[in-house]
Amino acid sequence: MSGTAEGSVKTTVSRPELPHYFWRDQSPARTRIRYITNHLKADFELSRLAIGPLGFDLEWRPNYRKGGRENRVALVQLAGFDTILLLQISAMSGMSKNSMNKFPLKLRELLGDPLRVKTGVSIQRDCQKLYRDWGVSTRNCVELALLARSVDNARWKGKYTSPLGLSRLLETYVGFSLAKGKVQRSNWELRLSSIQQDYAANDACAGYAIYTRLIALAGDMPDANPYYYSLSVVNGFVLDHLGISQWIPHNPHYDPGPPPPPKEPKERNETPRAPTSSTVSQGTASSGSSLQDGISISARQGPLLASVPVAPAVNSRAGAFRRIPRNRSTSTQRPQNHVNDPAQYSVTMRIQ
């Protein structure tokens, strides 16, 4: 499909308001939805699924504590041609004391099947989380953003791995937008309300609908290799769609278009700093020979601002000098008369 270049380049043109997607209106009339909370029903319904690709998504209870650990995946959503399954893993009781056995065996087998396509947005992240939480490997997963860039390069420009949201892809290829709201951040471990069920079904069905539109475009392209947009997460490792070799998202035929214009440098405010109490005055003392950085030698009698006995030789670095105690001779020679001894001079530091 051709069109104006979009993708990672932001534009100021507002997109038209589109109607919200609702699975009951967009799916075939015979589509059935099943909300499942036990193993036996899960295995039964999974065994009845028709052969074909599946829209795939996950939900989990949000953690409202900053820096807190994510909660485990609570809900797995699958959407096929005529069936939507909402499998609430958190509500299923394990068949043994091992909590991993709460995950239905048939669901584990289906997700690990390399012949069954699972498709969604940010699917690599979801599959990695599913493995961390439940030890489940998932094969043959299609990332919709990469698929769109591969088969509709004329429309999408920018970096190949730049994300494209589910709602944006749905608006582009199906003509509907996704309604979001507080339900997205609701508790997915409790008994699901009808609003939660519709929300979860919409996400999975939207992924399936986008995939069917895009894969039709791939049929007309000789270079649409599944390796460019498909992956697997096996034992925590990201592999190709067959789960054999390491996978890195790359498409040698993808044209990212011209690079974006460079950003204008920000103007820096060169505001002079106000003098602090430790700033040494650049002026000289009212009497005596001036030295560097406001340090002067004075022969005045009486108390000074800051007075320490020093040797007559001053280091070339500003303000550096060597102290000589009053009661210690500077050499092994016999002490001399100190009436005109320069060591009795002092250093005055004028402080602003």
Image (cartoon, rainbow, N blue to C red):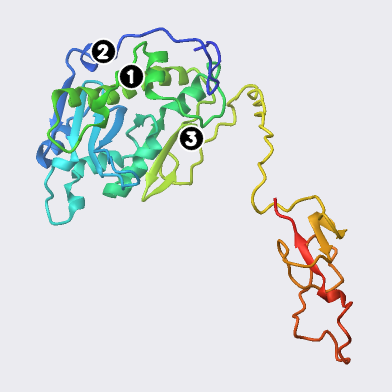
Q: Is residue 67 above or below residue 6?
A: below
Q: What residue did someone put label 3 on? A: 227
Instruction: Inspect this view and state whether residue 45 appears.
Output: yes
Above or below residue 329? Residue 288 is above
Q: Is residue 9 left or right of residue 116?
A: right
Type of amino acid under label 3? Tyr
Q: Amino acid at mark 2?
A: Gln
Position in image of residue 343 (x %, y %) = 83, 76
User: Looking at numbered disc 1 in the image, what kind of residue is underneath it?
Assistant: Ala
What is the distance, in whole Å, between disc 3 and disc 2 at their CAs?
Answer: 30 Å
* Residue lying at the far top of the rendered structure: 16
| Label located before the other in sequence (3 or 2) | 2
Q: Position of residue 280 (x, y in %)?
A: 73, 53
Q: Position of residue 68 (x, y in %)?
A: 31, 47
Quarter of the figure with residue 110: top left
Q: Which mark is residue 26?
A: 2
For marks 1 and 2 on the same chain, the one whose residue lies earlier in the sequence: 2
Residue 273 occupies quadrant: top right
